[in-house]
Amino acid sequence: MIARKSFLIVVSNYLIQIIGMVGLVVIAKFWGRFAPEALGIIAFAMSFIAIFSIISKLGYPQAHVKRISEGKDLGSCIGTFITIKIVLTALMVSAIFLFLFIWKNILNEDFYDATTESVILVFVAYYIFVSLQGITTHTYVATGEIVKKQIPIILGRILKVSLIFLVALAGVTALGIAPPVNWPSFLYPLQKFISDHPTGSLAMTYVLDMLIVFFSGLWLLRKYPIKKPSWNLFKSYSSFAFPLAISSVIGILSLNIDKIMIGYFWTSTEVGYYFVVQRVFEFIIPFSTSVAVVLLPTISSYHSLKNLDKIKTTTHLAERYISMIMFPPIIFIIIFSVPIINIVLTEVFLPAAPVLIVLSFYTLILCFNHAYSAIIIGLNKPNVVAKIGISICITNILLNFLFIPRTGLLSSFGINGPTGAAVATVISILVGFFGYRVAAKKIVHMKIFQIHTPKHIIAGLIMALGLYFISIYLTTIRWYTLLLIAFLGLGIYLLSLYLMKEFYKQDLMFFLDLLNPKKMMKYISSELKNKKPENFNDSDNLQKF
């Protein structure tokens, strides 16, 4: 069941990312040289407000998942969590406007080249809905209802990309980018408004996306039990959330400080390069994050039963499949970074190719970390996650200050700006890589490294060598050529694993079973029909991963 739920998250997340990438491609194709700047303005504003969104989390989402998965009363949990989220969201908004008031009226500062005030205000609304939609999202994670979690997100992204098409087709007045198609006369006022305010209009698509996610999630939650908030439950949430609050702060800082610092030391164009490359890796990360999403309530259930052997077995198997699946796409991206950018986006984004290569290593390490962080949280050790998170964040911020500026520590080697931020990110995530494993070894006596991973590395290197020699003899690479090469590389990888006796018949049957559409539709149907769950405790229904 863990595998099927994880795979369902992967499939739906890939659908979400494909829809989102279509929007980026449309902007890149129609806006040309303005695309990096526009996307950089959006990315900076998102990262800027994301820092304040720390207040809206503070570890309470993980506490909500933890308490429901332990079998606490579902209605009381939902009622308590709703109250917590409303209060925290109000505090977040207050903090944002207080900061803006002090920044403009007391410090007499202005906004830098990387963004505009109007776009920042649009993203205040965006993060309000991001915070509130967490009420439904984390409830569905806790109850294991992955379909209900993903459907609102998919609906929101479909609306968003549709609106991005509209915005992209309006043109950009300031740069003389004319609309690629003629608009009906009755839509001229709308077209002119969008073309006069392109970045603001693009920002609004994000708000409307999250608006749909929020309201459709509420509609699916309409028949769930919602009771009065419980003071005792609030204290229980807080005792678990407090150590994780530090981890939450650290995590959000680590994810956003690089874009803010690139915008401070450079311009919105460099922020745009970095932002778009990060979006490319959102096609790869969903598998490991989906495993972690399902592992957390599962491990909590095993922990309540004091079944440490089951925890270790499940985690080791999850890590093996994460490792096996992550290497091929990472290797492929490293070897073909330039044609990927050229085909998926445009040559305008080619300066981001070094960033794409460096962040490939970050993505691989991050995927390995997801399973182990889920273990530690599931075993009720949030303070350990907090300590590791602090180490990662401090390392990341210090290295960003050293590597991002134009005259940074490694600038003589061509490493600064977005590339410097990528290098800092890779080094800092390595701190977490070793930290999580050492912690897991101490807590549940797990092996730090498995014998499977070196075999996957060897197979990946063989695949890389094969793809490199293929790339030497290719003068022109089209999208269909790239697709054929990807399948060839996967064949080399799987053959290498098979020869090393690392890919077995049961592995093939495992993946084929996951890909069985009949079984997946049966699972989706069964979940959607379960409209009013009682107290959740999945420990009796867990099946072998």
Image: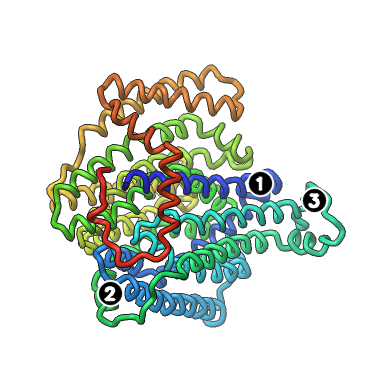
Q: Is residue 481 above or below residue 84?
A: above
Element type where label 2 sits in the image: helix
Q: Earlier in the sequence, mark 1 or mark 2?
A: 1
| Three-letter amino acid code at the position of disc 1 | Val
Quadrant holding the C terminus: top left
Disc 3 residue crowd, few under 14, some 14–19, many 20+, Cα 10 Å? some
Residue highlighted by disc 2: 238
Element type where label 1 sits in the image: helix
Q: CA distance from mark 3 to mark 1?
A: 15 Å
Residue highlighted by disc 1: 26
Nearest to the observer: residue 16 or residue 252: 16
Residue 316, position in %: x, y? Answer: 22, 42
Q: Earlier in the sequence, mark 3 or mark 1?
A: 1
Q: Are marks 3 and 2 in contact (CB under 8 Å)?
A: no
Q: Is residue 508 left or right of residue 100?
A: left
Q: CA distance from mark 3 to mark 2?
A: 54 Å
Q: Is residue 133 above or below residue 517?
A: below
Disc 2 residue crowd, few under 14, some 14–19, many 20+, Cα 10 Å? some
The answer to which image quadrant residue 460 occupies is: top left
Front position among marks 3 and 1: 1
Element type where label 3 sits in the image: loop
Front position among marks 3 and 2: 2
Residue 411 showing in the rendered view? no
Q: Is residue 79 left or right of residue 356?
A: left
Seen at 28% across and 57% down, the residue is 297
| Three-letter amino acid code at the position of disc 2 | Ser
Residue 221, position in %: x, y? Answer: 45, 67
Residue highlighted by disc 3: 178
